[in-house]
Image (cartoon, rainbow, N blue to C red):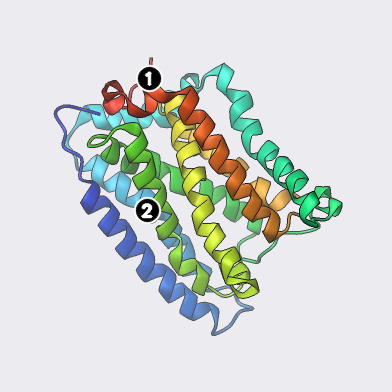
Amino acid sequence: MFSNYKYKPLFFFSMTFLATFALWFAGAYVSFQDDKSGLYMLLMLPGLMVPFLISLVMILKSKNSDLKKDFVNRLINLRLIQAKMLPVIVLIMPLAVLASIFLSLPFGGSISQFQFAEGFSFSTGLVPVLLLLVLAAGFEELGWRGYAFDSLQSRYNFFTASIIFSILWSLWHFPLIFVNNSYQYEIFHENIWFGVNFFVSIIPMGMIISWICLKNRKSIIAAILFHFIINISQEMLEMTQITKCIETVVLTVVVVAIIAIDKEMFFSKEYLTGKVN
């Protein structure tokens, strides 16, 4: 944080939700008018970019050179990423997926879930799904880590900021359940509880991303990389929605373990600055 700058979390999240919801609900309407053209993505993609664009505007208009330099540094400085954290970044989600599949077997889960998926579980019209997964990780974290999370951490300790952010991040996805052919639309129509699980699962995921980011000296690149690994891990294997419910429990256990191991970081007032030695 910067002592000579006052963050504006209420303004940021209000504007982000307002702009994103307007674009995504409009996109949802268009998605049912002609589901073959994919023109609705012309509304969905700008909505995806909203957190980054609002962050960028707020940083540029801040008239604070330290804030601007810090954002650029966290975006381009690969040296912020800690070598000892790379295995954690790369392996947490794939291992959580494998553990969830294994735990599903006694409850009737199929061993075929360990097989690679033949395709993605949803479609995105004009935009290839893999590209969308990359763009989602990039634009979201540029916004969330560029300004949003720091704005919360300027007022709360790391634990509280992580909880608040993760809940807001989960709610931010709400309009997607109305978009034809989206992942959220598909699972809600398969079983409403699968849809509920999607939103609940975002909370532990958000807390882990926040932890990964801060442990790597607030590197936005580290957050983007881990976010993309989350996205691709959910699509790589033939994992069922029942198993994804189990995965939410597994991720929650991971969060509890992280908090227990890094208790000082989560609750110490020292970390209100958002800086890690």
The residue most toward the top is 277
State whether residue 154 appears in this view: yes
Q: Secondary structure at mark 1?
A: loop
SS category of the residue bearing label 2: helix
Q: Nearer the viewer, residue 64 or 114?
A: 114
Q: Is residue 222 left or right of residue 266?
A: right
**Image-based side of 100 in relation to 144, left or right:** right
Q: Position of residue 260 (x, y in %)?
A: 47, 27
Residue 36 image-quadrant placement: bottom right
Q: Which residue is mark 1?
A: 276
Residue at point 44%, 36% (across, down): 210
Q: Is residue 214 above or below residue 54?
A: above
Q: For residue 127, which quarter of the picture?
A: bottom right
Q: Nearer the viewer, residue 202 or 85?
A: 202
At label 2, the amino acid type is: Leu
Examine the rendering and report whether any part of residue 143 can be seen: no
Look at label 1 and name its amino acid.
Val
Q: Residue furthest bottom?
A: 33
Q: CA distance from mark 2 to mark 1?
A: 24 Å
Q: Position of residue 34 (x, y in %)?
A: 58, 83
Q: Quadrant of the N terminus?
A: top left
Residue position for label 2: 168
Assess disc 1: are there few (<14), some (14-19) or many (≥20) residues with their C-alpha within 10 Å of its C-alpha.
few
Q: Nearer the viewer, residue 129 or 200?
A: 200
Residue found at x 58% / y 55%: 132
| Residue at figure coordinates x 57%, y 17% from the top left | 83
In the image, residue 228 sits, relative to residue 171, either above or below, namely: above
Q: Position of residue 91 (x, y in %)?
A: 66, 32
Label 2 vs 1, first from the N-terminus: 2
| Quadrant where the image shows the C terminus | top left
Asked if the residues shown at circle 2 and circle 1 are in contact, with their CB atoms under 8 angstroms apart, the answer is: no
Structural crowding at the residue carrying mark 2, measured as other residues with C-alpha within 10 Å and reported as few (<14), some (14–19) or many (≥20)? some
